[in-house]
Amino acid sequence: MDWDRVLVEVEEMLSPRLENLYSGFHSHHEQIQELIQVVESLSQHIQTHPKGKPKLSIDVETSSNEEPKRPQTARVNPSRKPGFDKPGTADPKNKKAEEEKLKKEEAKKKADEEKNKKAEEAKKKKEEENKKKEEAKKKAEDEKKLKAEEAKKKKDEENKKKEEAKKKAEEEKEKKKQEEAEKKQKAEEAKAKKAEEAKNKKLEEESKKKAGEEKKKAEEAKKKGTEDKKKEEGKKKEESKKKVEESKKKGEEGKKKTEEHKKKAGEEKKKKGEEEKTKTESHEEGKNEPETTEEEKHEDPENAEPSSQPEENSEDKIPNVDNVSDAGGSPIEPANAEDLLIENNDLPQENNQDSAPEENKESTSTEESKESSPVAKPTTSTLSLEEIDKLIASLTENHSIDELTTGKPFELSVGAKSALSLLTTMDDDKFYLDRYPRSDVVWAWRIFFQLLGQSLPEDDSKAWDECRKFLIDSRNKEKNKKTVDKIFNEKVTEFDFSDENIDKLEEIIGGRESTLNPQYFTDFCALTGLLMFSVREAALFGGAIKGKIPLWRQYKRLIHKKQKIEGNTN
């Protein structure tokens, strides 16, 4: 408790009562003094007039200013007549009375003076006491005010603290709400992602089943093709044997004809005689030359056996399409199936197709169509349904299901991250905040925003306005409390690699993947050149451009393309 404050309040409460009591005591003191004086005068009178002791009726309540009535002590002389004394004669008793009266007056004056003096002193004391009380009261009030101000300050501080605590509590509450909302959103996204993954798994399983069935069908077709091939080869061998026999027969007939012709020539020589020997010899030589050519012609069918044999060998040596490269028949390792989506070449053709006989061209082409699978590496955007099925079959043959279905999340390389870190050291004019860049730069930024799942306006100037807003916001270090490279790294983690978004990305790129080169952009826009490291890696990871695409991404894109084509046909 505040004892000073209690004392001040008690003094304030008791001081008026004490003042009343003090004034009452003072007035009683004066009356007592007056009584004392009256008693003294009476005693003196009694001493001077011992015989006469009249009864006194003393009025105590007479005021101090009025002189008390003198009591009548002397008896009236009945023998004496009323009147004046004789002149020249003085009564000693009267003299004494006057002296006593004078003494009393002087005593009264002294008493009054003392009384006034005491009253003044009492008044002064009272004034001093009142002054002290007022000072004490003022002091108490000042202290009270100070204490009240201090209490108010303390209260204000406490209120401020309470408000700050309330604000903090509200901020924490809002933070918690935001965190809960983010968690909820993440949970929903994860749920949607899981649902999508489950859907994709189902589709993949269905496609695997279909691929297995197609594989079986392909194997059966292959077996049938090999059987048909063997049968056709047997037929061809028989036909070639027949042809050889026919050519042999023709050769024998030709030999017979030449022998007959020689006999006729010999007979003619004999008839002409010796005179015409020289002429006949020259004539015989001229005839012998065409005969030899005819013999050669007839001998060619005899040599047809070795020439037909290469034809058979050429048919036997039709390369298996699974082991033929697009360049010239060199075998391909099975591991190269993971790069089937990288290059965009035509389907392979037999290298010995031009050298083979015209008779075998149709058979070889039919065998190719039965057994061949595309070994070239086309992009999925230009593939037909049959080609996609063959690519899926080749992937499932050469790789396990785990390899084709399990994939890792996208991560930037160290080089791409270091390129983004250089954005913090770039000058303001390199960010094109006050002007419009060339169309190639806007095109590159369209790819970046599409990777984030956002489509920019078709007009380049409007599209760059959106890019400028993003750049200004990402470079605001006070607002973000992060550097610009960290903002870009966070945006990279938000890239959308869904099949639908990659389809849109392919449309934007439109076969210009060669332009997605950091060096190309660095020559005229350093900002885009540094960004292009990340954009190119992301486009390659998503399967939108040619390059070393992950196996599972190839498989996923093929299945998506197949479903898309089947949906369009239905």
Image (cartoon, rainbow, N blue to C red):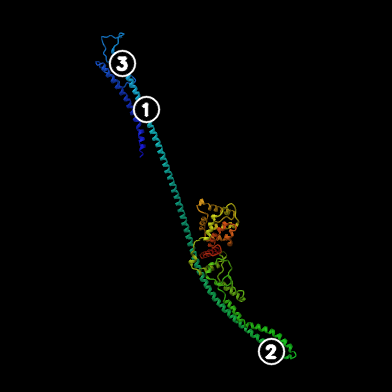
Instruction: Tell me where residue 470 appears, x and y as whole percent.
Output: 54, 53
Q: Nearer the viewer, mark 1 or mark 3?
A: 3
> Circle 1 is placed at which residue position?
124
Q: Residue furthest right?
A: 275
Q: Which residue type carries mark 2? A: Lys
Instruction: Tell me where residue 482 appears, x and y as whole percent.
Output: 50, 53
Above or below, 101 relative to 148: above
Q: Which residue type carries mark 1? A: Lys
**Regarding mark 2 in the picture, which secondary structure is present there?**
helix
> Circle 2 is placed at which residue position?
263
> Circle 3 is placed at which residue position?
99
| Among numbered discs 1 and 3, the one appearing first in the sequence | 3
Answer few, some or many: residues within 10 Å of disc 2's Cα (few below 14, many 20 plus, some between 14 and 19): few
Instruction: Tell me where residue 429 appears, x and y as whole percent.
Output: 58, 53
| Among numbered discs 2 and 3, the one appearing first in the sequence | 3
Front residue of this view, candidates 550 and 557 = 550
